[in-house]
Amino acid sequence: MNRIQLLMLGLSLLPGLVQAGNWRIDQAQSRLGFQYRAMGAPVDGEFHRYLADIQWDANQPASAHIRLDVDTGSIDAGLPDATAEAAKNEFFDSRRYPWARFVSTAVQPQGKGRYLLQGTLTIKGITRPVSLPILLQADGPAQQLKGTFVLKRLDFGIGQGQWADPSALANEVPVAFSLRLMPANPPPR
């Protein structure tokens, strides 16, 4: 393998080093959060680092393509002990699986800025189909992309061993995101 091939292979292993597509995420004004129930008590958490490749044309939403890579090691599970545990093998196994990935496969307009985004979600090497209802609203030159869905953590092997018991740690984890999208190449002034 020559140097160019090695470089290309290396770059393919680090998803989203650069923001691709025609939109980029303004992380300072975005949030990817979740809530889980541990021993019956609700706890809020979030991921702090995520990268995206977003191709979106409001006139042709069916041709949209969205890929979102989430750094599993950037989790804040709401409690210091839970945050330390989340990177371990029983949960996200962040050393082996540093990225979770969503890739869209279809976009269906629902009217009034609402869309059904279908795709696949991969966590810990396990890929499952998902449907995400989203709302996309113009905000000047930016767009605000919002949505919620319920993640069944056990479908992805999140929380094994003693944590596989849904009475100790609920299986259903509501996820909410609000992503501020900025034009990747803003028009010249």
Image (tube, rainbow, N blue to C red):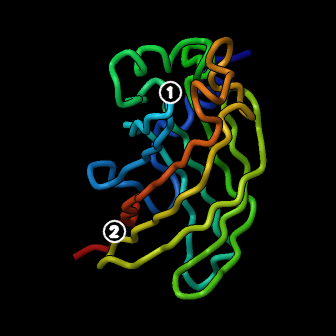
Quarter-wise, where is residue 44 in the image?
Answer: top left
* Mark 1 or 2, nearer chain start: 1
How far is mark 1 from mark 2, CA to CA? 48 Å
In the figure, is residue 52 to the left or right of 118?
A: left
Quadrant assignment, res 108: bottom right
Give residue 36's position: percent from left, percent from top. 50, 38
- 166 left or right, relative to 78: right
Label 2 crowd bin: few (<14), some (14–19), many (20+), radius 10 Å: few
Residue found at the very far left of the displayed protein: 189
Residue at figure coordinates x 45%, y 48% from the top left: 19
Kind of residue indicated by mark 1: Met
Q: Secondary structure at mark 1?
A: loop
Residue nearer the viewer, 10 or 178? 178
Label 2 secondary element: loop
Q: Quadrant of the N terminus?
A: top right
Residue in the image at 40% along x and 68% along y: 144
The numbered dot on residue 170 is none
Q: Amino acid at mark 2?
A: Pro
Image position, residue 148 (x, y; %): 53, 58
| Place of residue 117 in the rendered image (x, y in percent of width and height, measured from the top left) | 66, 65
**Residue 133, above or below 54:** below
Residue at figure coordinates x 63%, y 31% from the top left: 12
Q: Nearer the observer, disc 1 or disc 2?
A: 1
Q: Quadrant of residue 141 in the image?
A: bottom left
Q: Position of residue 45 (x, y in %)?
A: 40, 37
The C terminus, quarter of image:
bottom left
Residue at left offset 59%, top offset 55%: 149
- Taking depth in this image into account, of 166 and 119 the one nearest to the observer is 166
Q: Is residue 43 left or right of residue 89?
A: left
Name the residue beneath numbered marker 1. Answer: 39
| Image position of 143 with respect to 112: above or below | above
Identify the residue position indicated by label 2 in the image: 186
